[in-house]
Image: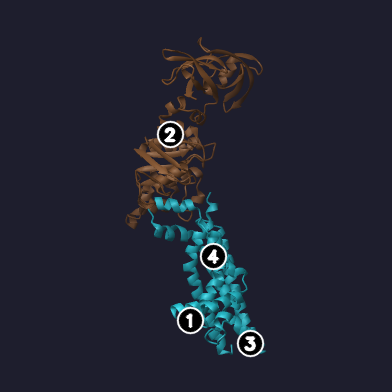
């Protein structure tokens, strides 16, 4: 499925995006993710396909706003029965309970929304959206209203069920974790859709500096192409002369952005791209350690599992050797 | 009570209040919705105009209405009817007089409503009719009802507007507050006392009802859902 939409207000935006399985539209707040979802749902004036021109109540989509919008005066099953008006009254409850069971929360049918946790509310809202028999689900920031501590666990359960149902889903989010779990990722910036592809491609080979920042590249440097050979280039960077994979567009003398992920700094084996730096500081991040190194004029951020930190016996202020794997160095056009 | 005119007056007052309240409901709900949720050019002017009866001396409002609705007014000359000194004139005056009060109540009720609920209801296949009947009204009726009751109570006791636009024709356009004034003027304090007592009781009961509704409404606004 592909959506192609153009809207003028509240943000000017025009994009074509494939929806493949669970698709995440990644972008910072304010770039128009929510507006796009609303436009597809028919809640904002816009031109586009599919569903172009239909009023919201006739579009076969399931729309979940950020806070799920359960009707507070209705019990869970009554919420789910809301779109079931075309069924005989006697059958509505049974069908509603069926959808709740699909989301694994049949036992919550008699509760009011205020008696449900965020994750439970989300499942009720999904059951209600499914009762609409949608051809496309639209989820606005599906992980942001969940408790931070349990959100990955809670949403993983939802994700499994959505995958089992096989309904194409478009989730707008600024959460890289969610994008990593997607089947397809689009990256939206102020200039429009910057990139789309499978998550492993978007996360490893962002198309621009902006995308690189969004998908978690912490080390980004201006550089220039100093030499070109078969499949590889040598770039002059603030870190020194480094070997990197050659992108098809790279030409001798060209100015480029050089990026590497924090977790891909510090692979010590191998000969190429060896650097020496001084360890400025490191601090725990969950069970991993994040730190900063000064290499030449530049600073390099790294992220290591704790066993690796122990193996290396690192101390703040010490000189350390670093190697950057040429295949993991990523070049972007300047 | 000894004076049969009083009962006629009370019946008329209740009738004017009831009709005005119903008209306010029909007119005020859409207007309040638009003021609460839409942005448009000249919105502040509209808001100021509908609030004007709150600050304008009732006699000024009544005076302009009298000019507008009277025998030689623009309406009589173009459309050929005059509502001054008639039931209809009383109702027009009362509607304008109580509009700010009713609108405020409705608007507060609508403002507390989460617009996501309405948009989501539409994506679930509900047309505007179902959205109003099954989402908006069930969530806002205590606020709407309390606004209506306040408008009703406000109309019961109005004086200046109805005096100007209705005169004080006993049994035809005389409302309770004017009746009380007339009795006092005639030094019949016992009758004034009885009429005032009835008005006090009714007003207290209505305000009490509004307070109870507000309690109930607050306890079920959507903010408690999250």
Element marked by disc 3: helix
Give residue A331's position: percent from left, percent from top.
Answer: 48, 21
Q: Residues within 10 Å of mark 2 (few under 14, many from 20)?
A: many
Q: CA distance from mark 2 to mark 4?
A: 46 Å
Q: Which corner quadrant holds the N terminus of chain A?
A: top left
Inspect this view and state whether residue B159 appears. no
The nearer-to-camera label among 2 and 1 is 1
The nearer-to-camera label among 1 and 3 is 1
What is the number of the mark on residue A186?
Answer: 2
Q: Residues within 10 Å of mark 1 (few under 14, many from 20)?
A: many
Write down the chain letter for disc 1: B
Residues tagged by mark 1 and mark 3 found on one chain of the structure: yes
Give residue A269's position: percent from left, percent from top.
Answer: 51, 11
Q: CA distance from mark 2 to mark 1?
A: 67 Å
Residue A29 lies, with reference to residue A271, above or below; the image says: below
- Residue at 41%, 12% (x, y): give it: A230
What is the number of the mark on residue B183?
Answer: 3
Quick check: marks 2 and 1 in contact, CB under 8 Å?
Answer: no
Write down the chain letter for disc 3: B
Question: Which numbered disc, 1 or 3, marks the residue that appears first in the sequence?
Answer: 1
Residue carrying label 1: B82
Quick check: marks 1 and 3 in contact, CB under 8 Å?
Answer: no
Q: CA distance from mark 4 to mark 1?
A: 28 Å
Q: CA distance from mark 1 to mark 3?
A: 29 Å
Residue carrying label 4: B103
Element marked by disc 2: strand
Residue A22 occupies quadrant:
top left
Chain B, hue in figure:
cyan
Write down the chain letter for disc 4: B
């Amino acid at each position: 499925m592909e959506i192609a939409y153009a809207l003028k207000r509240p943000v000017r935006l025009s994009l074509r995006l494939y929806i493949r399985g669970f698709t995440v539209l990644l972008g910072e707040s304010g770039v128009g993710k929510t507006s796009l979802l609303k436009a597809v749902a028919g809640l904002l004036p816009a031109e586009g396909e599919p569903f172009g021109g239909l009023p919201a109540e006739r579009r076969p989509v399931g729309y979940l706003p950020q806070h799920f919008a359960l009707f507070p005066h209705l019990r869970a099953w009554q919420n789910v029965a809301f779109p079931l008006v075309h069924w005989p009254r006697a059958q509505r409850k049974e069908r509603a309970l069926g959808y709740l069971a699909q989301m694994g929360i049949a036992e919550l049918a008699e509760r009011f929304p205020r008696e449900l946790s965020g994750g439970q509310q989300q499942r009720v809202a999904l059951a209600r959206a499914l009762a609409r028999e949608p051809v496309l689900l639209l989820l606005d920031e599906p992980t942001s209203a969940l408790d931070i501590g349990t959100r990955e666990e809670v949403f993983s359960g939802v994700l499994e069920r959505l995958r089992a149902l096989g309904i194409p889903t478009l989730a707008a989010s600024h959460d890289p974790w969610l994008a990593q779990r997607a089947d397809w990722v689009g990256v939206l910036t102020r200039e429009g859709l910057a990139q789309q592809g499978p998550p492993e491609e978007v996360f490893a080979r962002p198309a621009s500096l902006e995308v690189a920042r969004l998908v978690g590249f912490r080390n980004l440097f201006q550089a220039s192409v100093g030499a070109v050979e078969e499949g590889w280039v040598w770039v002059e960077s603030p870190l020194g002369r480094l070997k990197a994979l050659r992108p098809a567009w790279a030409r001798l003398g060209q100015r480029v952005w050089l990026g590497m992920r924090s977790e891909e700094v510090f692979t010590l084996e191998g000969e190429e791209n060896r650097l020496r730096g001084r360890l400025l500081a490191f601090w725990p991040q969950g069970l991993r350690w994040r730190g900063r190194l000064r290499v030449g004029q530049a600073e390099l951020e790294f992220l290591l599992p704790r066993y690796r930190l122990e193996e290396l016996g690192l101390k703040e202020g010490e000189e350390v050797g670093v190697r950057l794997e040429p295949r993991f160095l990523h070049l972007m056009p300047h | 009570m000894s004076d049969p005119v009083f009962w006629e007056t009370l019946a008329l007052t209740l009738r004017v209040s009831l009709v005005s309240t119903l008209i306010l409901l029909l007119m005020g709900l859409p207007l309040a919705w638009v003021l609460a949720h839409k942005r448009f050019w000249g919105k502040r002017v509209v808001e100021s105009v509908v609030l004007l009866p709150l600050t304008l001396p009732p006699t000024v409002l009544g005076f302009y209405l009298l000019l507008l609705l009277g025998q030689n007014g623009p309406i009589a000359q173009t459309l050929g009817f005059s509502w001054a000194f008639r039931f209809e004139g009383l109702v027009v005056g009362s509607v304008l007089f109580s509009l700010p009060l009713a609108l405020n109540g409705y608007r507060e009720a609508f403002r507390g409503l989460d617009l996501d609920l309405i948009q989501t209801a539409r994506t679930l296949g509900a047309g505007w009719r179902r959205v109003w009947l099954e989402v908006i009204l069930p969530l806002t009726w205590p606020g709407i009802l309390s606004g209506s009751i306040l408008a009703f109570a406000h109309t019961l006791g109005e004086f200046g507007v109805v005096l100007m636009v209705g005169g004080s024709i006993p049994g035809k356009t005389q409302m309770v507050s004017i009746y009380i004034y007339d009795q006092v003027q005639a030094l019949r304090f016992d009758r004034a006392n009885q009429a005032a007592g009835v008005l006090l009781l009714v007003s207290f009961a209505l305000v009490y009802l509004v307070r109870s509704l507000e309690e109930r409404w607050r306890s079920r606004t959507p903010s408690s859902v999250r």
